[in-house]
Image: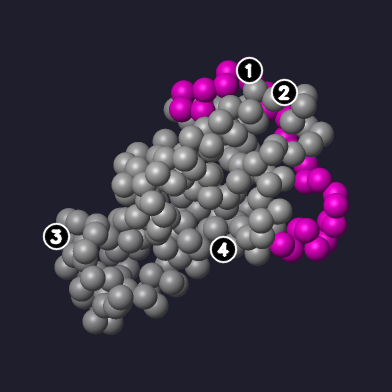
Amino acid sequence: MSADDRDLAVRAARGDAEAFAKLVRAHSSLVYRVALRISGAEHAQDASQEVWIRVWRNIRKFRGESAFSTWLYKITVNTCLTDRRKEARRRERELDDEMPFLPEPSGGEADPEAAALSGERRAEIEAALEHIRTEHRAALVLRHMEGLSYAEIAEVLDVPDGTAKGWVSRGRVAMLVVLSDGAGGAGGNSSEESGEGGER
């Protein structure tokens, strides 16, 4: 953790609103970026605001044992996962057995890492992420879009290293399926997304 982050976190924990504001300015892009990829464009702004509310409420619990950014990733991911589960339960109640609409991919490439780097396919990647199981999506975003190590992902998601690796791998496979599914994706769900509701 940078000395600046450590100093600002200590000051914020003591109630220094200006120090907290500096942390928000320094890391707001990280929070919004992760929220966008996990929660989707419709909910990213609200999720980001909820993250910073939780950070302010819990800043006194931050002990500096890991980087501030790692702690922030954890709060961001947990907030987004919680919100998605609530939204999924709400949709299940409203739609009963009706399948949610899956946008039809426009391209033919099926490499999620290469596609993530292509501005032309960014919208397609974000649409595909909507149809990957929540935990796998979070792990995939942290690994291939945020560049975290498996150890860092395990810490953020509070799972063993092996689980983190498995979730990234499954997320990549699901991304391949969604991006290469063409017309088949427009009328149904991926096994990832359909499996999500069954466990919750």
- Disc 3 marks a residue whose amino acid type is Ala
First in sequence: mark 3 vs mark 4 = 3
| Contact check, label 3 and label 2, Cβ < 8 Å | no
Magenta-span inclusion, residue 193: no
Q: Main secondary structure of the magenta part?
A: loop
First in sequence, mark 1 or 2: give its number: 1
137 in relation to 5, above or below: above
Tell me which corner region of the image, top left, top right, bottom left or bottom right, holds residue 180. Answer: top right
Under mark 4, the amino acid is Thr
Observer able to see residue 45: no
Earlier sequence position, callout 4 versus callout 2: 4
Question: Mark 3 — residue?
Answer: 3
Q: CA distance from mark 4 to mark 1?
A: 33 Å
Q: CA distance from mark 4 to mark 2?
A: 30 Å
Is label 4 or label 1 in front? 4
Q: Which residues are magenta?
A: 89-114
**Label 3 near label 1: C-beta < 8 Å?**
no
Where in the figure is residue 18, as x and y percent of width and height? Answer: 27, 73
Residue type, numbered disc 1:
Gly
Query: How many C-alpha atoms fall within 10 Å of the one at disc 2: few (<14), some, or many (≥20)?
Result: some
Would you say 123 lies left or right of 63 here? Answer: right
| CB contact under 8 Å: marks 1 and 2 | yes
Q: Which residue is mark 4?
A: 82
Q: Where does residue 164 sit, x and y in percent of width and height?
A: 42, 45
Which of the numbered marks, if any, corresponds to residue 108? Answer: 1
Q: Which residue is mark 2?
A: 182
At 59% from the left edge and 62% from the top edge, which residue is drawn?
Answer: 83
Label 3 to label 2: alpha-carbon separation: 49 Å
Residue 136 in view here? yes
